[in-house]
């Protein structure tokens, strides 16, 4: 589902873009999607950094984490066992 977003810009900006053949709607859509994706990635990086710091403080080794993840996957996904 999509929503309508409107923006007010000076007339000369719209006219200049249109003279150059810029599809204003597509440009705005692309820029907004790219920014939303950038924000998502930034949030995920922050969450991963925090999780990494918490694991480091917990004293759990990387091998133990991998083993826990593997066991969890195997318990939830039929046919995944090796």
Image (cartoon, rainbow, N blue to C red):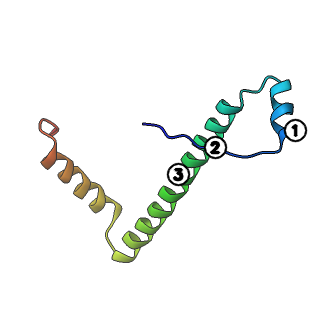
Instruction: Place residue 80 in its image quadrant.
Output: top left
Residue tagged by mark 1? 12
User: Dot 2 lies on which element?
Assistant: loop
- Residue sitting nearer the eye, 65 or 48: 48
Q: Going by the image, does 10 lie left or right of 61?
A: right
User: Dot 3 lies on which element?
Assistant: helix
Q: Residue at x 37, y 69 (%)?
A: 55
CB of mark 1 within 8 Å of CB of mark 2? no
Give the distance between the C-alpha atoms of the residues marked 1 and 2, in whole angstroms. 17 Å
Instruction: Place residue 57 in its image quadrant.
Output: bottom left
CB of mark 3 within 8 Å of CB of mark 1? no
33 to 50, vertically: above or below: above
Q: Going by the image, does 9 lie left or right of 74?
A: right
Residue tagged by mark 3? 41
54 to 80, vertically: above or below: below
Mark 2 or mark 3, which has the lower sequence index? 2
Quarter of the image with the C terminus in it? top left
| Classed neighbour count for the residue bearing mark 3: other residues with Cα under 10 Å, few (<14), some (14–19), many (≥20) | few
User: Dot 1 lies on which element?
Assistant: helix
Mark 3 or mark 1, which has the lower sequence index? 1
Q: Residue at x 56, y 48 (%)?
A: 36
50 to 67, vertically: above or below: below
Q: Residue at x 61, y 36 (%)?
A: 29
Query: Residue 19 at x, y = what percent?
Result: 86, 25
CB of mark 2 within 8 Å of CB of mark 3? no
| Classed neighbour count for the residue bearing mark 1: other residues with Cα under 10 Å, few (<14), some (14–19), many (≥20) | few
Residue 6's mark?
2
Give the distance between the C-alpha atoms of the residues marked 3 and 1, in whole angstroms. 34 Å
Instruction: Place residue 56 in its image quadrant.
Output: bottom left
Quarter of the image with the N terminus in it? top left
Give the distance between the C-alpha atoms of the residues marked 2 and 3, in whole angstroms. 26 Å
| In this rendering, the label closer to the viewer, 2 or 3 | 2
């Amino acid at each position: 589902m999509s929503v309508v977003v409107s923006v007010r810009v000076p007339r000369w900006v719209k006219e200049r873009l249109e003279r150059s053949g810029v599809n204003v709607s597509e440009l705005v859509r692309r820029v907004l999607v790219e920014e939303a994706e950038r924000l998502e990635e930034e949030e995920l990086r922050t969450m991963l950094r925090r999780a990494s710091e918490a694991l480091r403080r917990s004293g759990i080794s990387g091998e133990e984490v991998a083993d826990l993840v593997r066991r969890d996957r195997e318990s939830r996904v039929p046919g995944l066992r090796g």
